Image (tube, helix red, strand yellow):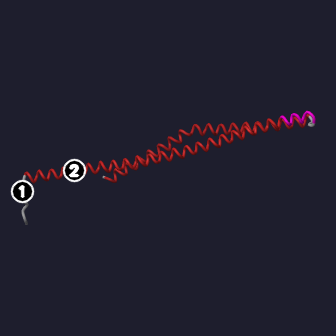
């Protein structure tokens, strides 16, 4: 067996410098991996937030359109009922007996009450929707942020 030659001070200094370079390179590589993972996470989070925002804006626009349509429908029904009530009043003065008129008026009053209940239900649903907009955004934001945090932790763990 050949004996190892003793290491000289110059050789030892060279060995220490080479180990220092390896050690520094390892930190540089870790920084690059961390920056890459962070960039990926930021990009995916930004994309998810953008998609979420777009979807929510579309949903809110559709909700507003439905609400406006329902409100217009109700207004049209009230206008229609007002016109019909006036026609019946005019006819009742000359053609309809009093008992029939009372029945007709009672039916219209019941119809108006139903429409008012329908309108109140729609307004209640719209109020409920407005209250839940912020809660939905918060939950979706927390889910996206949590998944981004988990993906970052996995990326950092894989690179170690």
Q: Is residue 40 located in the magenta-colored stretch of the structure?
A: no
**Residue marked by disc 1:** 6
Question: Where's residue 40, x and y in %?
Answer: 39, 50
The image quadrant where one finds the N terminus is bottom left
Q: Alpha-carbon neighbours of circle 1 within 10 Å: few (<14), some, or many (≥20)?
A: few
Which region shows up in magenta?
A: 86-94
User: Horizontally, is 151 left or right of 61 in the view?
Assistant: left
Which element type, helix, strand or loop, lies under badge 2? helix
Q: Which of marks 2 and 1 is in front?
A: 2
Where 105 sits versus 46, above or below? above
Q: Alpha-carbon neighbours of circle 2 within 10 Å: few (<14), some, or many (≥20)?
A: few
Which element type, helix, strand or loop, lies under badge 1? loop
Question: Where's residue 17, x and y in %?
Answer: 15, 50
Q: Which residue is drawn at 57% across and 39% down?
A: 132
CA gap, disc 2 and disc 1: 25 Å
User: Horizontally, is 24 left or right of 130 in the view?
Assistant: left
Q: Is residue 87 located in the magenta-colored stretch of the structure?
A: yes
Q: Which residue is drawn at 46% across and 48% down?
A: 47
Q: Which residue is drawn at 53% across and 40% down?
A: 135
The numbered disc on residue 23 is 2
- Kindly report the secondary structure that dominates the magenta region of the rendered protein: helix
Question: Where's residue 93, x and y in %?
Answer: 91, 33
Observer-nearest residue: 131 or 39? 39
Task: Work out whether mark 2 precedes mark 1 in sequence or the reverse, and give the earlier one.
Answer: 1
Observer-nearest residue: 131 or 46? 46
């Amino acid at each position: 067996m050949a004996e190892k030659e003793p290491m000289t001070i110059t050789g030892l200094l060279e060995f220490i410098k080479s180990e220092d370079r390896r050690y520094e390179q390892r930190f540089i590589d870790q920084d690059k991996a961390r920056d890459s993972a962070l960039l990926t996470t930021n990009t995916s989070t930004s994309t998810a937030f953008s998609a979420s925002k777009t979807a929510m804006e579309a949903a809110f626009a559709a909700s507003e359109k439905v609400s406006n349509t329902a409100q217009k429908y109700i207004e049209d029904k009230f206008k229609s009922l007002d016109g019909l009530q006036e026609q019946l009043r005019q006819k009742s003065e000359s053609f309809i007996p009093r008992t029939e008129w009372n029945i007709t008026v009672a039916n219209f009053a019941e119809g108006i009450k139903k429409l008012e209940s329908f309108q109140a239900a729609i307004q209640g649903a719209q109020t409920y929707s407005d209250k839940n907009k912020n809660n939905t955004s918060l939950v979706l934001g927390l889910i996206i942020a949590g998944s981004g945090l988990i993906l970052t932790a996995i990326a950092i763990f894989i690179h170690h």
